[in-house]
Image (cartoon, rainbow, N blue to C red):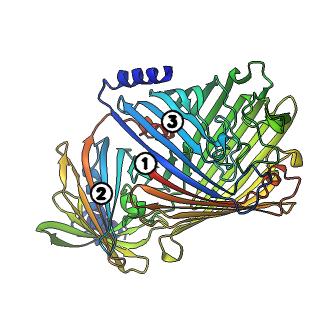
Amino acid sequence: MKLKHYLLFLLMAISAQPVWAEWSGSVTYEYRHFPNEPLNPVQHNDNSSIALQPEYHHQWDNGRQLFSFIPYIREDEHDDARSQTDIRELSWLKAGDIWELRLGIRKVFWGVTESQHLVDVINQSDLAANTDGEDKLGQPMLNLALIGDYGTLDLFVLPYFRERTFPGEKGRLRGEYYVDTEQDAIYQSEDKEKHIDYAARWAKSVGVWDIGLSHFYGTSRAPRFDIGFNNKGQPVLVPVYDLIHQTGLDVQATIDSWLLKLEYIHRSSDLESYNASTTGLEYTWYGIFTSPTDLGLVLEYLHDDRDDKATTPFENDVLLGLRFAFNDTQSTDALLGIITDADKDTTIYSIEASRRLGDAWKLSLEARYYEKVDATDQLIYSIRDDDYIQMELAYYF
Amino acid sequence: MKKILTAISIGLLASSISFAQTAEEKGLAIAIEADKRDTGWKDSTTEMFMTLRNAQGQESKRQMRTKTFEVKADGDKSLTIFDQPRDVKGTAFLSFTHSKRPDDQWLYLPALKRVKRISSANKSGPFMGSEFAYEDISSQEVDKYTYKYLRDEKVDGKDSFVIERKPTYEHSGYTKLISWVDKNMYQAVKVEFYDRKNTLIKTLTVSGHRQYLGKFWRAHQMDMTNHQTKKSTTLEWKNYKFKTGLRSRDFDKNALKRLR
């Protein structure tokens, strides 16, 4: 209720000026089918979910001030952990000549690669929504950007931590023990989720190069897990969030039809210290066979020097991707991807495709298939029977 | 001997500045004059409306807003924000055109809040699924073509220069473009596009020219017809504004992320 009053006040205060303001957004119906039987009988083979994401943007001061509000509501058929309400964005921004101040709940993306986003550390992943980690929760922040010939220096104060979401007890794409986010997570910091995190990033474009250098200190967005018990006395995973330092570098060279990419991080906590990287390239043939279709080739190598102790499944893996953009009126596109382990047999196949229907609808398909999953690739091993196909129908307003 | 050489060189010099210029020189001179007349507008904003039609006459709409910033001695900077179709609403495109090296381009994807540097080698691909290629709608810099004056001709009763242009940049989908340039406005009123096989593939007609700030002409409608696919696209401009006070800072990656 308090939030509502605050919003109303804010809207009234800023609507007094000549402005550009607009509501828009989307409603998305999602259906997932899992052809294999689940590990646990409480899980299901078919699942529907509906998500509403309205957007309000209010721009004034010749585009130099912006207010944004993006709430997000999802209702899932079976999995309570996937049913959630979030504020993806509730922010105010003011741009000066050599600075920008951004205040509120926001989303920030850092990085250049496609297979994984190592450097991108500000926002928490909404893994309940999609295990690919591209969905993010809104992050409260104070962000001052200093802008000049030296590039952009972004300074962040992050006063509140958001716990990662995971599929729940009745959801698929979880291991034998599900992650219980109902009970309190374990934090290294005594301040728990109120620990104040800090981050800084310098970025600059020089000729064909786009370079970013960043540092983060605070609560790790990626937890490790302890075994605990839920309120029914069943064993579950309880997330443990350590304090970390992470230094990141992201570089892209854009040369003719080639994109050369690197993301590198060094992360350290009281328990471990490691390096991880994604190195890759992308080449696009524009107008293959004198058609309007573009074909992009994506090749990335994923490395983590913790090897089998890595908390990600990508310690020594290769991604090969083919991206088709048909450049038709309905913007049809498709992305085929294979991630394979360089020294084990574990392979993930992935297909993503989408097409606009009419002017306001969009149909998307997604499929994932896990093959010959090695037991040492724990994260994928735990979801080895969770191959799925997903259809999404979205309406945009 | 020395005197004869001097006489010859004076003669050569004289011929190059006389009216007996070659067709290439005359073509280039017209392009330079057109560029000169369109210098000094500083910045502009406008709304663009696109109607795509397939061979059966089915229509599809696009809508976007563009801000442009004039850069002296190099290509212009521009920022395009997409409003329709609604699934790409908020997507924005930042382009720094350069006269002598490939353009720099970035795309902002609002769902991911991601700014992607993209390759500018995509010249011949369709813009938003339309009959306009990226190279048709990007900033037309003098250095991007070689020129040849062909003849004078009337188009819709207007006296025009007919000029042949050949792209000097890589990855063009065209071998040549034939432009009809209105002698009064120094603005193209019609363009024919010849593909890599040197076949006439598209014809553009440009109309609704209006003069701004007492000097700068802007077309308000372009109709592109593809003779091979029988598809066509109409591009209309509304609400042109000039010297709106935009600065270079309004055309950087930070601005790309904040525009709505």
Vertical placement of residue A263 versus A2, above or below: below
Q: Would you call the spot at circle 2 few (<14 residues within 10 Å), some (14-19), or many (20 or more)?
A: some
Could you tell me how far apart the alpha carbons at marks 3 and 2 are, in whole angstroms?
Answer: 53 Å
Label 2 SS: helix
Are marks 3 and 2 in one subunit?
no
In this rendering, does residue A105 appear at all? yes
Q: Is residue A156 above or below residue B177?
A: above
Residue type at the position of mark 1: Lys
User: Who's the residue at 17% across and 72% down the image?
Assistant: B153
Q: Which residue reaches farthest left?
A: B157
Return the mark for residue A33. Answer: none
**Cβ atoms at labels 1 and 3 below 8 Å apart:** no
> Which is in the foreground here, disc 1 or disc 2?
1
Q: Residue at x 54, y 73 (%)?
A: A288
Chain of the residue where label 1 is placed in the rendered structure: B
Tell whether A376 sits left or right of B2: right
Disc assigned to residue A71 = 3
Q: Quadrant of residue A232?
A: top right
Judged from the image, the secondary structure of the residue bearing numbered disc 1 is: loop
Q: Which tag is nearer the camera, tag 1 or tag 3? A: 3
Q: Quadrant of residue B188?
A: bottom left
- Identify residue type, mark 3: Pro
The residue to which callout 1 is attached is B89
